[in-house]
Image: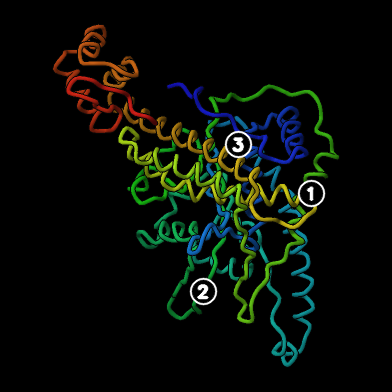
Amino acid sequence: MSLNSQQPFPIEIFPASLQNFLNKTNETLNFPIDFLGAGLLFVTSLLIGNTHKLKAKNGWIESPILYLALVGRPGVNKSHPISFLLKPVLDREKELEKKYYEQKQEYEQLSEQEKASQPEPIFKQLLVNDITPEAMCHVHSNNPHGIGLYKDELSSWIKDFNRYRKGSDEQFWLSAYSNKPIKINRMNKPIIHINSPFIPVIGTIQPKVLKVLFSEDRGNNGFVERMQFVFPPILQKPKWAEGELDSQLIQEYSNVMSRFFEIELETDSNGQEIPYLLSLRQDARELFIQWFNHNVDDTNNPETNQEFTAYISKTDSLCLRLSVIIQALNDVSKKVYINDISYESMEGAIKLTEYFKSMFSTVYTYQKFSKLESNHPERSNFYNSLPGQFNRRTADKVAEGLSINLKTAEKYLEHFVNHELLFKQRQNDYRKTKK
C-alpha cells in the first residue's frame, strides 16, 4: 500500500525560532520532522499541565492532554527525537530530585517532635516510563501539576493492561484522557484521589505490531480513537549527516521550555487545582465553528468507514486541545502570559488536526490491509487491482485477469462491502470507501 497521499507535518504552526531549531535538528541529526513535531507537542502539553484549560462553552472544558504514538520500523530514529526534546524536563527533574534529597536529609535529622510539626518532603516526579495505574496515581498525588508517561515501546504499555483486573487499566486511561477524577481504593491503604488527572502519553511502535492497539475491542471502546498516530512516509535508516547542530539553538530551545516552569499551579484552601480558563477569541470561535460543522459532515457521511467515523467524532476535542498547546508555545516563546486562543492558533490547531486525521487513516488502512493480506493474499490482490470507482462488469474483468472465478469474485465483493472497504452505491456500482 502507498503512504504517499498523507499530509506532511505542518511545522509552520510553531514559532519561527522553534521551526528553525526543528529543521536544523532534522538536517544534522536525521531526526524526522514528524517525530520532532510530535515530541514538541508532548513536551509542551506536559509543561502546561493543569495550569491552563480551555472553556469552549459552558459545560465544555478541554485539558490539553495528548496520547501520541510514533510509528516506524527499527532504525528510523523514533525514540531519539523524544529523548532529545525532553532534556529540559529531565534536567528540571534532576534539580527537583537533588532538592528532595537535601530536604529529606535535613528532615531525618529532626527530632520526632519536630517531624510531627511539619510535613515530610516529597519528590515531585515529572516523568514515568513503567508504572501501574495505582502507582501512577501515587506519583501524581505528589505532583498535581501533571505527570508524563514515556514508553519507548508502546506495545509493552498495552500488553500490561489488565494484568491484575480485567478492564481496569483501560478504563483508567480512558478516564485520564478525559481529565475525569480518579479514585483508587485498596484494602488497608489510604484512598488515592486525583481530582484532575493530567497524564499525557508518548511512545513508539513498529508497524507490524500496530495490531496490538486494535486488539481486544480497543477499536470499539474508544481507546484507539484517543491515540494520535505519527506515521510518516516509509522511512529508512538514514546515512551520516554532515554538520553540527548549533549549541546556541539547543540553548534557546531549552530557555523557551524552561519558562513553563515559572508558571505556578494555583490551588484553593483544600489543595484542589485552580486552572486558568482560556477562551476562544471571537474570530477563533467563528473559525472553529466553521471547521466543526465541516467535521460533522465528514462524520455523518455514509461513505466514511465506521471506524474512521468514530475517530473523526473525537477530533473536535483534539482540535481544542491542540489550540491550547499552540497558543501556549507561541506566547511563552514571546515571554508573555498565555492568552486566549487567537485566530492564528486555531488555524494551526485545525491544520494539526487534519494532519492527525490523515495519520489515523494511514494507520487504520495499514492495519486493515495487513490483516487482509496475511489472511487472504488473493482477495487482497483483487481489491488492490480494482479502480476507485467501478461497476460489476469491470470487477469481473479484473477477476478474469487475475484468474479468479467469478463466483469467488462475487463473494470477495460482498466481503469488501461488509468490512466497509467498498461502498455499494447501487445494485452493481461500487466505490472504494474514504479512509
The residue singled out by tag 1 in the image is 334
Binning the other alpha carbons within 10 Å of mark 2 as few (below 14), some (14 to 19) or many (20 upward) gives some
Q: Which of marks 2 and 1 is nearer the N terminus?
A: 2
Binning the other alpha carbons within 10 Å of mark 3 as few (below 14), some (14 to 19) or many (20 upward) gives many
As measured in the structure, the alpha-carbon distance from the residue carrying label 2 to the one carrying label 3 is 35 Å
Please identify, in this view, whether the residue under mark 2 or under mark 1 is nearer the observer: 1
Say if residue 227 shows up in the picture: yes
Binning the other alpha carbons within 10 Å of mark 1 as few (below 14), some (14 to 19) or many (20 upward) gives few
The residue singled out by tag 3 in the image is 78
Mark 3 secondary-structure assignment:
loop
Q: Quadrant of the C terminus?
A: top left
The residue singled out by tag 2 in the image is 192
Mark 1 secondary-structure assignment:
loop
Say if residue 213 shows up in the picture: no
- The image shows residue 86 at horizontal and vertical percentages of 69, 48
- The image shows residue 161 at horizontal and vertical percentages of 42, 54
Residue 336 relative to residue 193: left or right? right
Foreground residue among 99 and 43: 43
